[in-house]
Amino acid sequence: LSSGIAGSATIQPAGTTAHNTASVSPEAVDFGDVPVGDSLTRNVTITNETLQITSVYLAGTDAGVFTVDSDSSGVSLEPGETLNATVGYQPDDAGADNATLVIRYNRSRFTGEEDVVSLSGTGVIPEATTPDAIDFGDVPVNASAERAVTVENTGLAPLN
């Protein structure tokens, strides 16, 4: 199609584009060292500014030792709503664990987009040391002897 008019024109688009405007704080959660069998929780705040958040869930090979409170699993956040999710870590063996908290959202034309919060923690086993034997020497029958013993907790878990 030709108009016979020479030159060029610049077209300026009008309107707004959809951007990921959900904010998550913190962006990563490190639980640090946690004794095996114990648990620790942290809060993650998800604020939905303009998107529709359709789900919040855990993923990754170590996801089984992390939890997210039940109020978060079937969540649907409309624009302007905030969710305070409680994320937990309960290691079942010693070593590093990693997973992600996935925040899935939809835009009008795009589905299945997501943000993630990295989760990490290390399961530790409290160290127990056994001191050398305590020598009471020769003690006559029906007599007693005393020795001072010091017990010190240098580990990461309470002594019971």
Image (spheres, rainbow, N blue to C red):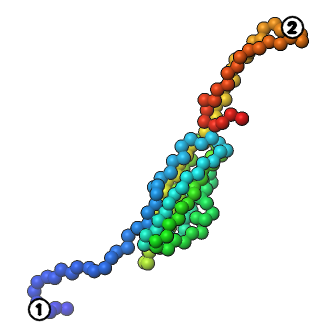
The quadrant the C terminus occupies is top right
| Element marked by disc 2 | loop
Q: For this rendering, which residue is in front, 74 or 99?
A: 74
Res 120 visible: yes
Q: Three-letter amino acid code at disc 2? A: Pro
Check the image and report above or below for 113 versus 95: below
Q: Earlier in the sequence, mark 2 or mark 1?
A: 1
Say which quarter of the image contains residue 155. top right
Mark sitting on residue 41: none
Q: Residues within 10 Å of mark 2 (few under 14, many from 20)?
A: few
Which quadrant is the N terminus positioned in?
bottom left
Label 1, residues with CA under 10 Å away: few <14, some 14-19, many ≥20: few
Taking 119 as reference, is 147 above or below it? above
Q: Is residue 27 toward the left or the right of residue 153 in the image? A: left
Q: Residue at x 23, y 79 (%)?
A: 12
Q: Is residue 148 left or right of residue 53?
A: right
The amino acid on which the numbered mark 1 sits, given as a three-letter code, is Gly
Query: Left or right: where does residue 140 sit relative to residue 110?
Result: right
Instruction: Compare residues 127 and 59 and report the one nearer the observer.
Output: 127
| Residue that mark 1 sits on | 4
Look at mark 2 in the image and give the residue it sits on: 140
Q: Residue furthest right?
A: 142
- The image shows residue 38 at horizontal and vertical percentages of 65, 45
* Percent of width and height locating residue 109: 43, 78
Q: Tell me which corner region of the image, top left, top right, bottom left or bottom right, holds residue 148.
A: top right
Give the residue at x 62% y 54%. Answer: 64
Res. 152 image quadrant: top right
Give me the C-alpha separation between circle 2 and circle 1. 124 Å
